[in-house]
Structures are given as C-alpha cells and as structure tokens.
Image: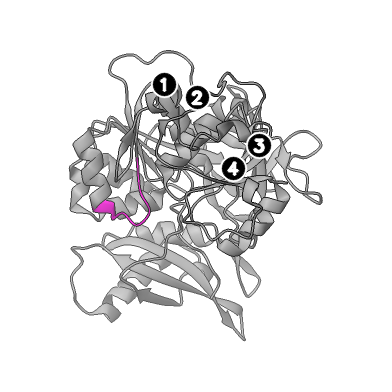
Amino acid sequence: MLHAAHASFDLGSLERGSCLDGRLAELRGRSVVLAVADQALAALALIELDGLARRVVLCPADVPPEHLPHVIATAEADAVVSDGTAALPSLPTDALFVAKPPKTSAAEVERQPQRTTEWVLLTSGTTGVPKLVVHSLDSLTRPIASSPARGPLPLWSTFYDIRRYGGLQVFLRAMLGGGSLVLSSAGEAVGAYLERAAALGATHILGTPTHWRGALMSPSVRRIQPRYVRLSGEIADQVILDHLRDCYPDAGLVHAFASTEAGVAFEVADGKSGFPADLTGARIADVDIKVEQGSLRLRSPRTASRYLGANAEPLRDADGFVDTGDMVEQRGERCYFVGRRGGIINVGGQKIHPEEVEAVINSHPQVRLSLVRARKSPITGALVIADVVLCSDAGAGDSRSLEQEIKEHCRARLPRHKVPATINFVPALEVSASGKLERRNA
C-alpha cells in the first residue's frame, strides 16, 4: 500500500488495470523519462514499466525545466510519461504518455518481465546539469536483506523523494518486504506529514540529518513512535544523533553512508557519529572500503554500471572503485566525515570543510541548525561566514552577545582560521528537494 497526502493505492490496482490509460504496451522496449510530479503515481508507473521498457529515467519533480532537454537527449528517450505538470520540451505526439490514477484497462498487457530494465537516476546537479547514473534492479536491491521479516510488517515512512537514491531504497524495501509506505508530498508542511505518518502508524522512518533537524523543530515530532530511525545523505553529527536518541529512546537508531553512484556502503548503529576505523581496508558483506588521499572509495555489486552520455566520464577506476568525493579523517579508532572535496573553503591557503565547522556550531545548546559558507575577501581570499537557526526556546536576548558566545564556543574547539568571522541569525535555511542544505558560495 502506498499512502500519499491525497490518496492511498494498493498494488492490486495495477493487476486490475493500468495507470497509463491502456497505453502500456506502446512503451515496450522504449527509453522512457518518468516526469511525474506526484510520488505515488510515479511509483505505480515505475512498477508497470520495469521489465517492459528498456530504460526508465526517474526524474524528480524539482529538476529545473531547462535541464529536461539534456536529460531526454542523454537518455536517448523516445517516450516521456508525465502527469501534465512538468514544463516539457516539444515532443512528438506518440512520445508523450499521461499517467493517471489506475483504472481498469480495456486491453490486457502481458506483465511478465521480458527484459532487464535500466533504472537511471539523476545526480543532484548542484554544479550544473545532472549526471545520469545507470543502475539495474539487481544493483539497487543488493543492500536489501532477502530474509523474511519477523513480527508485524513495517510501515515505512520517508522524507525522501523516491526518485532519488535514498528514497528509492525505502520504496524497494517496502515493496519487496511486503510492508506499506507513507510518502511525503511536495509543499506539505513537516508537521502535517508527521501527523499523517503518526495517524497511519509509521514504524520505520528515514531522512537526511537536515530533514530530522526540521522535524525536531515541530511539536508533531512527538506524535510518531517509530521502532526504527535512519539517517543518510549528509554527515550525521553527534548532536543530531543525541537529539534523536532523546526523542525516541526505544527506537533503533542508524546512520548510513550511500551515494547515487556507489550505492549503500555500510551503516552504523552504535549511536556515535563517524564509523569504526577498522572498516577501512575491509570487506563488509559485498562492499570493499578504502580511504585514498583522504577520500572514501567503494567497490561492490551495488554500484551503478556507468554514466549515460557520449562523453561521460568513467564511473569507476581501473580497480573498480568509485571515488565518492567524501573526505574522511581518522581520529583514534574512529573515522569521521569532514565534508565534500569540492566544498572546501580556502582562507589564506588554509583549507576548511564547512561541515566540520557546522558540527561545532550545532553543538551549542541554543543552535538548531547552521550553514557555513565563504565570503570573498581581498586579503585572505575568503572569510568564513555562518548562518545560524536558533532553537525555538532560545531567548530573544542580545544577539550580539549570543554571537560572541557562539564564537567563543568555536574558538575552544577549532583552530583559529576555522572560526567564523561573522555569524548571521536567520529564521530558516534553504533546503533542497533531496533534503540537504543548499550550499552556494556567497
């Protein structure tokens, strides 16, 4: 069962009919871009297309319209499935298909899989047009345990969009494990989503650390009573893990590392940030893990096969490893993620990972969330600036005094060049549709 804000669908609705208005047979063997705004409708269309289309591109609703021609051309798409909401480029009449809530189809379609469908995911595209990453259903489902669940079936719930890697993992877990899934909807307030998940009895809830920080600011966060809480997609610092443990003391609390290209690598369930250092150089299940030049690198059958495109760069190195670009630092017997290789701020020749500074700022008791960025400086090249969202119960006192207090908090824990030159108090921070903080240089 798929639960969306407006309706619920059971998979039996596809056995009785089609969400593609009787035109499913026309999509056999075609390369299809799935550009449907509604997640539940996209999920139903995806289930129908697997094994029928040769390629399906999962296009999230937030993809800028100007990028759609690039996606369609790179995928060599000869069909687009839409619900009429996306601003599509001009297409031949026989290339456009409209998805609707399932209804009985006049024409029976042989649904037995006839081919291996390529499942194509888009990278976030924060530095330009997105890359198209080719997975198979096998590579996507490798991280999912096949043993039957014991006890009541889980009712999964996720802040993620199921057309991104993290959300797709939740969708597949729910579908293959026989559970149900509560989907978030575009524009739905966090509180409203949590109330809906609570009313349906959600037991397993997943999101990015930013998703969870937003949820913890809502009174409705106490309405849900999950058995399992999972974070991925961003660095899970100790502050957010401790807040979630305090909020849900009886839930299993896990943070995991995964990427669109490399798939799920490992998960950490000890309640601590970072991961045990002995994971590096090891083989966990079917994943080889190593750190080279400070960057985490992975090799496994969970990895995508390639990038699409005539001039696409290789996805793996000569030894089959994917360079994730996530930088790792070992401290004692534990490794910690410090940031992305491409996100470094250079202050007078000193390199700073914004996420490292954010973790310290977030540990201040009056801070809920922060974003560290660069501002150009004619002297040092850049200055470190922090935008800070305060906790709802933070006093409305002297902001200048609080700014100095947070700076002193940073000075006690960071080298001088990493301490923010300026702290701006803001009501909110911009979050991408994938649930991550929007990071742009000032």
The disc, 1 or 3, on the residue closer to the chain's N-terminal end is: 3
Residue type, mark 1 in image:
Gly
Check if mark 2's residue and mark 1's residue have beta carbons within 8 Å: yes
Give the amino acid at mark 2: Ile
Tell me if label 3 and label 2 are in contact, CB under 8 Å.
no
Question: Which residue is disc 3 drawn over?
Answer: 55
Q: Mark 4 highlights which residue?
A: 260
C-alpha span from label 1 to label 4: 22 Å
Magenta region: 183-191
Horizontal and vertical percent for residue 200? 23, 34
Percent x, y of residue 347: 60, 73
- Label 3 and label 2: CA atoms lie apart by 22 Å
Q: Is mark 4 on a helix, strand or loop?
A: loop
Q: Name the dominant secondary structure of the magenta segment.
A: loop
Crowdedness of circle 2 by 10 Å Cα count: few (<14), some, many (20+)?
A: some
Residue positioned 35% across, 28% down in the render: 10
- Could you tell which of marks 1 and 4 lies nearer the N-terminus? 1
Q: Label 2 to label 4, Cα distance in Å?
A: 16 Å
Is 217 positioned to the left or the right of 41 in the image? left
Measured Cα–Cα span from mark 3 to mark 4: 17 Å
Instruction: Point out the frontmost of discs 3 and 4.
Output: 3
Q: What element carries label 1?
A: helix
Q: Mark 2 points at which residue?
A: 144
User: Badge 4: how crowded within 10 Å, few (<14), some, or many (20+)?
Assistant: many
Is there a contact, CB below 8 Å, between mark 2 and mark 4?
no
Residue 402, image quadrant: bottom left
Query: Against 176, is 377 above or below?
Result: below
Residue identified by numbered label 1: 177
Q: In which quarter of the image is residue 264?
A: top right
C-beta proximity under 8 Å, tags 1 and 4: no
Q: Nearer the viewer, residue 185 or 256?
A: 185
Name which of mark 2 and mark 1 comes first in the sequence. 2
